[in-house]
Image (tube, rainbow, N blue to C red):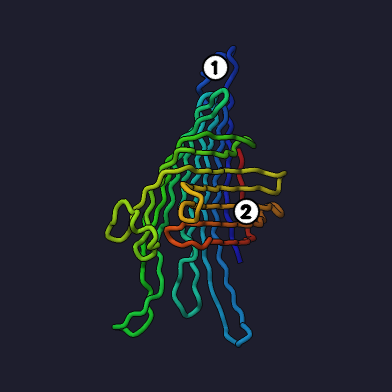
Amino acid sequence: MGLVIAWASVTALQAQGPDSSSAVSSAEPRYVSTAFYGSLSASYATSDNWAGHDQRNLTVQGNLFYSHNLFGNGRSHSHQAMADLGFLKYVDSTWEKSIDNVQVNLLWSNNGHKFNSSYTVAFGTQFLPASFPEYDFEQDKLVNRSVGGFLNPFNMQVGYGGVFRFWNTSTANVAFATIQLSSSPKEFASPAFLDANVIEGKRAYYFMNYGFSLSTAIRKKFGNHVEWINNTRIFGNGLDRDHVNLQLSNMVIVKLWKYLQLRFDTRLAYNPLLNYKMQFRQEALIGFFYERNK
């Protein structure tokens, strides 16, 4: 069972000609577009495995996506904000966090004749602390221990480079000078990085690195029924597994009939500070969709 509620709006501003009495300067914006998508979904599943074990679980999840793009003769910007929060509950058990993420990507660019320079800020963190089971010897049982929270861990990148624009509002940015600030909970930090920390806090290690970054912000419609939304960030200051970070969010939306929508949402993440394994999440959701254009 799934429910999706979404709203989108697009507004375009076109500069008038020089002979118009209300003409605007060349620095004024020529095109502005905004889009907002929000979804809330819930599902309940029950099954029996080969050993006869009855398994029942309930999931609840919310997603938000917002983008704002301004394109002018001299300066432009492209901003995105994404948030996800979901919980999983096994019947007769406790709620567990299944997804928790907030990401903000900001890009400003100066339009030149041969090169479009850009300044970028990317920030990501979680809303709520994570938890993992730990054996309590005093109580003689497993208990859930909370780790981290808002801004722990977090990742922020500030970069300067060049941007390539395509499909009206989509961008691919290369920041060859990028500073990355990040944190990792002490419980999860890899021992290989403990000698390189900048500051040791009470509950986290804080790191700073300098390197390059690649990022994409894609929003493309194929006809009237299919839309592709992609946000990807890659940071690196080396060619081995200890010096690369990856975060990918890819969504394909298929409008089946009027308000009915099918969504395929793929997430990839790699952070050597926490784990050398690639994190992967795939979700397919069908539900009701509402769109508004003006």
Q: Position of residue 55 (x, y in %)?
A: 56, 80
**Helix, strand or loop status at disc 2:** loop
* Residue density around tag 1, few if under 14, some if 14–19, many if 20 or more, within 10 Å: few
View extreme (left): residue: 202
User: Which mark, residue 237?
Assistant: none
Asked if 52 appears above or below 287 in the picture, the reply is below
Instruction: Specify whether 160 is left or right of 7.
Output: left
Asked if 106 appears above or below 148 in the picture, the reply is above
Instruction: Specify whether 202 is left or right of 173.
Output: left
Residue under numbered circle 1: 23
Image quarter in which the C terminus is found: top right
User: Which mark, residue 289?
Assistant: 2
Q: Position of residue 98 (x, y in %)?
A: 49, 65
Image quarter in which the N terminus is found: bottom right
Mark 1 is on which residue type?
Answer: Ala
Residue at image x 53%, y 43%?
214
View extreme (front): residue: 239
